[in-house]
Image (cartoon, rainbow, N blue to C red):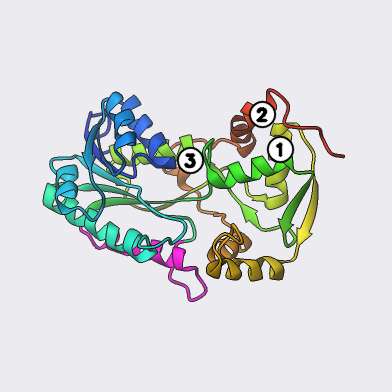
Amino acid sequence: MRDPHFGVTMLVAVTGATGFVGRFIVEHLLRRDHDVRALVRNAEEAGSLRDRGVHVVPGDLEATAAMRDLAQGADALVHLVGIIEEIGRQTYERVHVSGTRAVVEAARMGGVTRLVHMSALGARFDEGATAYHRSKAAGEEVVGSSGLRSAIMRPSLIAAPGNPVLATLVNMLRVSPLVPVIGNGLYQLQPVAAEDVADAFVTAVEDRSIEGTFEIAGPESLTYHQLLDQLEEALGVRRRRVAVPVSVVRFAAYAGMVLPNLNPITPDQLQMLLEGNTTTRNALESVFGIKPRPFLEVAREICAPWAATGAGAPVS
């Protein structure tokens, strides 16, 4: 039975509204006639949100007054702020754990009773887990013990134009006759369309009967090779692939910790790639009623600017 809030216009506070996923979620909230209030650090990005009718609160997660203003009187709060790499003061502990505590405290003080929280598929405290995944699990604990009615969302790789990982792969396939593949390329990913993720988040905002932790992913598990196959199909090219030993990439990843410009992948990112990112408990359709889009559809959207004009001569 759906919550009585479902179908009612609400005031929804959002952190991370200008991020890759945040832009999709804000768009979906506005499409469904909700009022949106967004915490924004960058004044330039704030302007585009104001043009859409979003009320902007300048500040960040550490600005107590801004957090109070963000949450005050909101019907729900969507927390999206996260990082994939630690840089300077922006550490996993500071952003994913302390930042989430700040959100929970602001929600309590502002009278918010509904929190929808962005975590990540693979979040856990296992000894072998990456620091990223452990921090995401710690953030989930903060939400789970908050006393707020909450939905914790664990998406897989989120696919859409603008995803930096997929953009790197597309650019490589466009211009390079040889494409490196780490190891055997059989590790699996289950990319989910950003539009589907946004739809699930807004459904969780509207329907408070949805409570707990939910893994959301695309309809199919793809090996890294299959992912490249579909991007190549979308681009209209075929590239030769060269296997790079995992040991070589791991050495470069650790060397990059000393010389950050030496290698584009961190040790944590390498580990997460090799362990895969899939789920057998995909809640997208069973809980949220959303039929997940195949990756090839999204790949065609990502590659459309180049496929229309020719991405380069195919390589046999």
> Dot 3 corresponds to which residue?
285
Amino acid beneath label 1:
Arg
Say which element carries label 2: helix
3 or 1: mark nearer the eye: 1
**Sequence-earlier tag: 1 or 2:** 1
Image coordinates for residue 85, horizontal then vertical, percent:
46, 59
Q: Quadrant of residue 4?
A: top left
Image coordinates for residue 287, horizontal then vertical, percent:
42, 43
Q: CA distance from mark 3 to mark 1?
A: 34 Å
Image coordinates for residue 106, horizontal then vertical, percent:
17, 52
Residue at 47% over, 73% down: 126
Say which element carries label 1: helix
**Sequence-earlier tag: 2 or 3:** 3
Amino acid beneath label 2:
Trp
Q: Quadrant of residue 184?
A: bottom right
196 or 161, which lies in front?
Answer: 161
> Dot 1 corresponds to which residue?
174
Magenta-colored stretch includes residue 129: yes
Residue at 34% over, 45% down: 16
Residue 105 bears which disc, if any?
Answer: none
Residue at 25% over, 53% down: 61
316 or 152, which lies in front?
Answer: 316
Is residue 4 shown to the viewer in this render?
no
Which residues are the magenta region?
123-147
Q: CA distance from mark 1 to mark 2?
A: 8 Å
188 or 241, which lies in front?
Answer: 241
Amino acid beneath label 3:
Glu
Location of residue 243 with respect to 190 vertically, above or below: below
